[in-house]
Image (spheres, coloured by chain):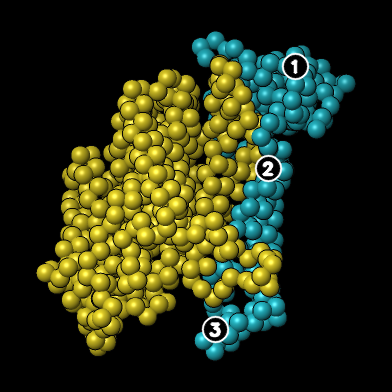
Chain colours: A yellow, B cyan
Amino acid sequence: MSLLKYESQLREPLVDGNKDYHQVTEDIIRPIEMKPSRLWYIGFTISAMLLAFGVYSVYREVTYGIGQWNLNKTIGWGWDITNFVWWIGIGHAGTLISAILLLFRQGWRTGVNRAAEAMTIFAVICAGQFPIFHMGRVWMAFFTLPYPNSRGPLWPNFNSPLLWDVFAISTYFTVSLLFWYSGLLPDLATVRDRAKTKFRKMFYGVASFGWSGSTKHWQRHESLSLVLAGLSTPLVLSVHTIVSFDFATSVVPGWHTTIFPPYFVAGAIFSGFAMVQTLMIVLRKVLHLKDYITVGHIEAMNKVIVLTGSIVGCAYLTELFIAWYGQNPYEWYAFKENRANLYSPYGWSYWLMMFCNVVSPQLFWSRKLRRNITVTFFMSIIVNIGMWFERFVIIVTSVYRDYLPSSWSTYYSPTIWEIGFYLGTFGLFFVCFFLFAKYFPVIAVAEIKAILKTSGENYKKKMTDIEKADAEKFYIDEVAHAH
Amino acid sequence: MAGGIKKFVVGCFDDEKVLFPAVKNVRKAGYKIHEVYTPFPVHGLDHAMGIRETSLHTAGFIYAITGTTTALTFIGWVFTRDWPLNIGGKPHFALPAWIPITFELTVLFSAVGMVLTFCYLCNLAPFVKKHHFHPRATDDLFVMAIECTDKTNDAEVQSFLQKAGAKEVNVQMAETGWWIGRYHKEQKLYKEEKGY
């Protein structure tokens, strides 16, 4: 029996170049063992400075109160919740790549899943800051947890979507972290076994939990990954569904719609993939990983972007249609005057969102543009801006003018501390990401090795040669066993 | 936890295509394979070695239903017995509104429980140390360790492994369990390998 599993020769290789198992280890682990480049130090310093500014902004908010932000009684949710939903959305792509694509047996996920999962974890950490500090008296944050307290005990309201969010996001963070770290164990062991310096031996020795790579352990590891993927798939859908419930279960015109859950999930995956593209394009260039994150990977992700972007566009139009068709004057006003009217105070943000999220991704119907790195990088930024504005539009344009005109509040612009908080989360995200890229294998080494002989460029060539020589024998030897 | 020091014959293979028939032949010859260490999950190797299927997923299911019942009974108790709140005149037993949290706890219990069980079964934890038969077992070698008894002629096993296609063969005395700290100081876990 042959052990080379068959993969159609029409598929492009997932690993380029002439690689064997050892070469894969070398390529991916070497950056960890080298001194970081100057670029790394510059990037890290800028991120750390942003983080410091963010910490100071939050310090002001905690010390002087929510008044440091320009929120008012009409616009109670502004940049803070916009940023929260934006960051949570970013996280979703990582789980989609690592879990849903695992269940669908998509080989190309192996090139990007590790970094995308790391992105998820850091994005969720950033997201969590906003609702926590939005509470104002942040030292009371633990009141959201159901613990036996001296107030009765008085429990949180389990029927409230805001509390569902607490559970959803903390579960999402925990499960993503476990999934990511259990996948990292074998690769950390690889780094440990190559380590020469005392620090690396100790650090990776502790971090790899004594992983040995025994067959029994791999068998359990595979089972664990599969079940965690099966759990993460509905989980990731539930998280953004619950985030959308924060809005959809209210009676605010513009929020009170049943389309929100699927629409939010599609939007989350859309923005998340854009962020993965931004990170991967830089990562493959800086760490010389073009053989592992190939143009084929970029193209596959662009296909997801054009699909989810179009779902989001469809949702925008459906929402608009239902607002008109539903004959609720407040709902229709929110859409017609607060959003679609370009000359209304925030009309510009609605059309900016439409352009970035619906019109611009349509470029990716062209194969040539999908495979163009520069266009992809540029587009990934556009999509992220667009998705930030989507959340801004949903939140601010719904609340600033609703039922009672005397309560309207037309102009809301953030203070420097509100912006600082947002920039600070960028700092936090990139500080984490820079550390990750320096100290952890950014590509799942073991998973790449597992697909190398079916999808590596050199192996695929060998297969083609065998097939050409004797097609019938090839079928019996290689293909028949593989199915 | 020490499992005792035993003697092993170790054979290193560099191709899974050679490894599979070797595993088969070694088992046929009646030798006891202690473990095969591979740098990545080699599909079908567990069956070839005759290892039974893992029941980890069953444990996951049990943790999951524990999470479901914990959430439902706890919220149910809070809202119908301990502190029934009147929320807009809606029923106290508001099952549909509890589904999100119930679902999240199901997933949380299952995931955390499974990972802990996995670590427990595989003896994985920070600071845990184990004997590693070859440093390249996590890089590009498939390392087969055959356990020796008093009757085993290790020279014979070595030549058997070499014939089966092993690139490197040796005999090692090794601790079979795990340990923490500086026990087994003489054991070099990180051997300096040429070219590494």
Rendered view: B140 above or below B67? above
Q: Which circle's residue, 1 or 2, is located before the other in the chain?
A: 2
Residue B59 position, x and y percent, is 69, 56
The one nearer the camera, A423 or A181, is A423
Please report, as a chain letter, where disc 3 is located. Answer: B
Respond whether the residues carrying marks 1 and 2 are from the same subunit.
yes
Name which residue type carries label 3.
Ile
Residue at 58% x, 63% y: name it.
A143
Kindly identify which residue carries mark 3.
B87
Name which residue type carries label 2.
Cys
Kindly identify which residue carries mark 2.
B119
Local secondary structure at mark 3: loop
Local secondary structure at mark 2: helix
Residue at 61% x, 43% y: name it.
A221
Please report, as a chain letter, where disc 1 is located. Answer: B
Respond whether the residues carrying marks 1 and 3 are from the same subunit.
yes
Residue B75 position, x and y percent, is 64, 73
Looking at this view, name the residue that lies furthest to the top. B194
